């Protein structure tokens, strides 16, 4: 099992998930915790499932969010294709049929590391025990969708469409 961990080490209110990685590796030795970025999600969604730990604005306690909550996420204003955040990326991956199951263990902004560790460990244990859905492969990745995913990652499209 692979768990993607997001955060910004330069911002104290957004760095707690990253600081938890070494401690979570000790608690869950069979889980691969990877420091990641929303722009890398397409590569991680091969099985149609994503498990993420990230800082979430607007919550008071560690909370597990799922694919059903994606449409509730606040969208940031976009000025360019470099402005895609987790919410936009998950919506695009879902629209492309690349993701059908998402678990986000949300850590409130500014939560103390020790408090977050116990709550994240408890939530993550629950997520890891959850039954997994089979990945639907019904949607074909058309050239237009491939180009959109490349643009969403902020890379120049690799082919001429």
Image (cartoon, rainbow, N blue to C red):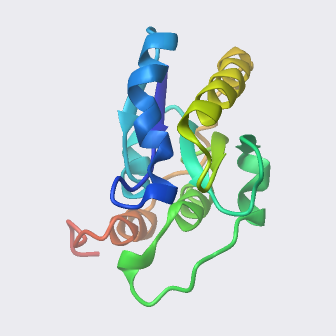
Q: Is residue 117 left or right of residue 85?
A: right
Instruction: Evaluate whether residue 48 shows in this view.
Output: no
Quarter placement of the C terminus: bottom left
Q: Residue at x 54, y 56 (%)?
A: 93
Seen from the viewer's position, the closer of residues 105 and 120 is 120
Seen from the viewer's position, the closer of residues 139 and 69 is 69
Q: Is residue 44 left or right of residue 130?
A: left
Instruction: Evaluate whether residue 56 shows in this view.
Output: yes
Tell me residue 118's x, y (percent).
65, 25
Q: Residue furthest bottom?
A: 79
Seen from the viewer's position, the closer of residues 65 and 55 is 55
- Image quadrant where residue 12 sits: bottom left
Q: Residue at x 64, y 30 (%)?
A: 120
Tell me residue 21's x, y (percent).
42, 30
Q: Residue furthest top?
A: 30
Tell me residue 7's x, y (percent).
44, 52
Q: 72 above or below 112?
A: below
Q: 128 above or below 9?
A: above
Q: How many marks?
A: 0
Tell me residue 133's x, y (percent).
71, 27
Q: Residue at x 64, y 75 (%)?
A: 75
Q: Residue at x 77, y 52 (%)?
A: 60
Seen from the viewer's position, the closer of residues 111 and 39 is 111
């Amino acid at each position: 099992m692979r768990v993607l961990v997001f955060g910004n080490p330069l911002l104290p209110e957004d760095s707690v998930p990253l600081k938890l990685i070494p401690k979570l590796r000790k608690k869950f030795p069979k889980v691969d915790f990877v420091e990641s970025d929303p722009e890398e999600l397409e590569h991680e969604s091969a099985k149609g499932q994503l498990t993420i730990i990230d800082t979430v604005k607007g919550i008071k306690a560690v909370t597990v969010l799922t694919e059903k909550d994606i449409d509730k996420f606040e969208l940031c204003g976009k000025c360019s294709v470099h402005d895609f955040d987790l919410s936009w990326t998950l919506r695009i991956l879902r629209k492309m049929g690349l993701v059908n199951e998402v678990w986000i263990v949300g850590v409130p902004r500014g939560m103390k590391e020790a408090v977050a560790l116990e709550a994240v460990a408890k939530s993550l244990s629950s997520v890891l025990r959850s039954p997994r859905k089979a990945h639907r492969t019904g949607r074909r990745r058309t050239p237009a969708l491939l180009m959109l995913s490349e643009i969403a990652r902020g890379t120049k499209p690799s082919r001429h469409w």
